Amino acid sequence: MPAANPFQDPLRFERRVPPCAIVIFGANGDLTKRKLIPALYRLAYDRRIPPGFAVIGNSRTPMTDEQFRAKMREALNEFVDNTPIDEGLWDDFSKSLSYYAGDLNDPECFNLLGKKLEEIEQTRKTEGNVLFYVSTQPSHYEAAINGIGRAKLAQGSGWRRIVVEKPFGHDLATARSLNNKLHEVFSEPQIYRIDHYLGKETVQNVLAFRFGNGIFEPLWNRRYINHIQITAAESIGVEGRGSYYQEAGALRDMIQNHLLQVMSTIAMEPPAVFESDLVRDERAKVLRSIRRIKPEEVPLFSVAGQYGPASIGNKDVPGFRQEEGVSADSQTDTYSAVTVFIDNWRWADVPFYIRSGKRLPKRVTDIAIQFNAAPHSPFDRNGADSTPGSRPNLLILRIQPEEGISLRFLSKDPGEGMHLRPVSMDFNYGTSFGSRSPSAYETLLVDAMVGDATLYTRQDMVEASWAAVQPILDYRETNHVDFPNYAAGTWGPKASEEMLARRGHVWRTP
Amino acid sequence: MENTIVMTTARAASVQPEKILKDLGSLWADLGKQEENGVLRACAMTFIVTVDESQDAFSVGETIAAIMHDHPSRAIVVRVSQSDEPSLDARVLAQCWMPFGRNQQICCEQIEISSSLGSLRDVPGVIRGLIVPDLPVVLYCRNFQLSQTPQFQALLPLAGKLVIDSGSAGLEALMYLASLPQAGCRKADLTWSRLTRWRECIAQIFENPSHLQGAAALDEIEVRYAGETEPVAAYYLAAWFKHILGTDVKLSRGTGPSFAAIAGVTFLGPGFEAAVEMMDESSEETRVNGIRQRVVFPEMRECDLLREELSIMSHDPIFEAVLSLANSIREKTWREKT
């Protein structure tokens, strides 16, 4: 472990990034253009990129360094947010970008990469530190890992790390297989499995809210919390990604990874110290404590939906099966809702309702914590509407689009009599505090470069979350649903409401 | 983020804390009635600004409006006129903005107290009644000469943090800040905040472990400053290096563009050569053993500097150490010259 840099001033500026090279597999893809290069440019603009720095792009498409740089420059124009493009800075930054074409199944591709890395270590002074970023199609992950292993690039004079994009496997078996493949080449501390939800400022703020304050944690358990609802709704459809989405679906694409990670952030025990492994240990414990659903229980604990055509605001919106690249009898879930129980002392019998869907009425991601009603209300005589039990306290943690926290409680209506009505106390991060938050990819890239895996998922976390949804995937494989079962622009299928109604609960409208 | 600033109803107020608070209450009630969706009142601290009336009145308001997005506060602006005749007046107002995509304005309250030098002794008593309970109190003295008056000194015990700007006042401000007792309110100087970008770039060089090893054996560190004589910024940087490495730093006059009164810094050691140097008004070049990197230094406005200072309410051990050392280096330099 190198000595800490005494020039750091954590009160005033962010951690400095060590010299390194980033190798992007799939550099001609969407993620590189939309997220990775804009995030790296923004880091350069914010003085976070070290002088010894290089990016090596790889894909099968033949391109010169200059063509690659021109392409990334175009991407920057289109996708960089809230950051001026400084031509001098770009000229300098673009010199760190290089590209080579190569097929990941061809060993020569990695021999060439080895030579390029040696050369760059000398010319760009990257000190032998290399971050491999696998952002190819999932079917090429293994080829990339094998190639790195065969060429012995997973070890070198500096540190070597690998970032693997989602989806991490298609089910529990493929996730385990991918983990095994990774471990043939890399040790677990070298592996960074990305879940960009964990990089979101507001998801991190959940930890600050829970463990930075003394007043909430005593209430954060089965004694006071009635149930929790986690919603990730999108108003858009598959937007030209029909063929990809058809293979994934809402359960795989959102719930297995992002929303179960969000749930683990809500439900985890406080770590002794905010350090990577301690935080991930606590998240992993929650995921391992998820009650396994028996095959016969699946219809009671989960609902699949698929949107049909509708007219929204005088505009005809196609159903999922009418989208390009989607088969006319697709059984893909564009909506999924699950009931999760965490079998531990803190959360026993508290339902966590998780839903995610496309073509819902609006784009919103939030977590609603519904507290138990007051045990006795002295105001009952004033009618049902004013009883606290009919309007329970709600704590809403909003992830997007308006990041913040709201607390709903009852207050006396002004005037005569003791009539109560719910009021909301709001706190808005983004709007009250207007400074720019780093994008999830900026945060995660810096973390990978400085070796902080706190916001990345670990092997046991990934496998536990797949294990939690595997019975539902297995059931859906053989039990087909009469899709479509909700119209675009609505809050999902009726069965989803019924799933909550069985426990006397209702979905709130976010 | 939406930048539109809306100045809303201003009301005259008698200069009694109770009256001012009552007027604030009425102001909020009026605002609530005017806006269909009500307004969101935001406050995270009491921010007291003392300013000479002859200074640009609008720029104070603009600075407060810019920082309230990050640090919403009850701002108390004390405008002091250079007259010995008794004169004291106050008014309340709210500054609001409508964040993009929302239909509710967010507002911060502002109290403006106009006082002649002759009435300044009455002001601490008024401010004492206007401080928001249970939240931090920051005192920003925009005019250094004002901070030297006994009336201003009476405000000091109210503040948890005192912010001054030695950029215009020079060494006198450094000496004053260093003379304040350690145990009192926390101290800050916007000159130090201006140096953050320099320090980030220097820290970046030494993030490389081989460079860090070389730092212990450096033969020379040179700080080149803009202007005729050593500015406070140069003493701060020299003190920072001494604090970290224990070595003395050569201060010399630089030429060419500068940022925060510094033109560049160079490091020389066995097999190690690095420099951080301004190339033009908004960009710097870092050179380390032959590798060059261009870095953007966007302009730092008063509001940017204050944002940084208002984010630090705890002890700032590095600045505290640097402040004391900088004053010692200044004394030593002065003795050597004379």
Image (cartoon, grey):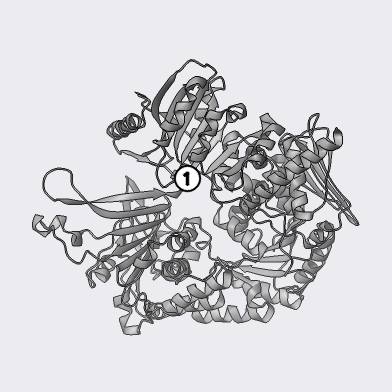
Is B176 situated above or below B249? above
Q: Quadrant of residue A151?
A: bottom right
The residue beneath circle 1 is B136
Can the viewer see residue A399 in this picture? yes
Q: What is the three-letter code of the residue carrying label 1?
A: Pro
Count neighbours of disc 1 (C-alpha within 10 A) and say few if under 14, some if 14 to 19, many if 20 or more: some
Give the mark count: 1
Query: Residue visible at 46% across and 64% down?
Result: A211
Which residue is at the front of the view, B105 or A311?
B105
Pinpoint residue B29: horizontal percent, then vertical percent. Answer: 28, 34
Which corner quadrant holds the N terminus of chain A? bottom right
- How far from the left and from the top, in percent, is residue A234? 40, 56
Judging depth in this view, the residue of A9 and A332 nearest the camera is: A9
- Residue at 74% across, 52% down: B243
Mark 1 lies on a secondary structure that is loop
Residue A316 percent across, percent down from the top left: 35, 50
Location of residue A240 with respect to A283 vertically, above or below: above
Residue B245, picture quadrant = bottom right
**In terms of image quadrants, where is residue B338?**
top right
Is A319 placed left or right of B46 in the picture? left
Q: Nearer the viewer, residue B336 or A127?
A: B336
Q: Chain of mark 1?
A: B
Q: Residue at x 77, y 59 (%)?
A: B208
Q: Say above or below: B142 vs A306.
A: above
The one of A302 and B249 positioned closer to us in this rendering: B249
Q: Is residue A64 visible?
A: no
